[in-house]
Structures are given as C-alpha cells and as structure tokens.
Image (cartoon, rainbow, N blue to C red):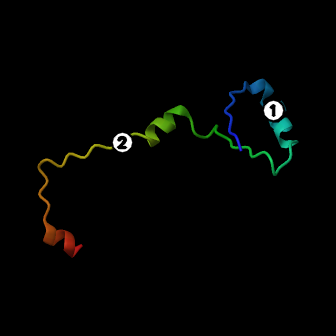
Amino acid sequence: MHSIRVEIQDGVFDKVICFLNNLPVNEVKIIDDATTSKETRKLIFNSIGLHTKDFKFDREEANAR
C-alpha cells in the first residue's frame, strides 16, 4: 500500500472526494488530514524540558507512593 498527500483547493474538493469514493473500498482508504493543522502538529511534537537540578529525590518517599 502507498500513501500520498494532496493539497486540494476548495472548488474541486467535492469532485476529488466523489472520485475517491467511487474507487473500490478494499483498495482505497481515505484519511482526512484536515483536522490536524500544521500548528497542531507543532504542539503535539514539542518536547518538554524538566529542570531537575535542585530536585532532591528521596527513595523512601518514592517507594511509599
């Protein structure tokens, strides 16, 4: 199976979706990527920095949890 990404103008979107829906269901899977914008992807994949320089880890307290 192959994946492609296509950016389509609003004017032809309905025509392309109609074409894709007419293809065999077991051979084509439509994945809507419109819900995940570029800004959302940046937020999902950002890492979080934890500053633990002054953190004292108490093994007894951790075991009690």
Q: Nearer the viewer, residue 34 or 58?
A: 58
Q: Residue at x 74, y 43 (%)?
A: 30
Q: How many circles with numbers are drawn on the protein? A: 2
Helix, strand or loop at label 2? It is loop
What amino acid does circle 1 point to?
A: Val
> Which residue is disc 2 drawn over?
47
Along the viewing direction, whichever of 39 and 5 lies nearer the viewer:
5
**Residue at the (80%, 47%) spot, across then down:** 27
Which of the 4 quarters of the picture holds residue 21? top right
* Mark 1 crowd level (few <14, some 14–19, many ≥20, 10 Å Cα): few
Secondary structure at badge 1 equals helix
Q: Which label sits on residue 16?
A: 1
Q: Earlier in the sequence, mark 2 or mark 1?
A: 1
Q: Please state the horizontal and vertical placement of residue 40, each as a whole percent of the image.
A: 50, 38
Residue 50 at x, y = what percent? 25, 46
Q: Amino acid at mark 2?
A: Ser
Corner quadrant of residue 13: top right
Residue found 18% across the figure and 49% down from its top? 52
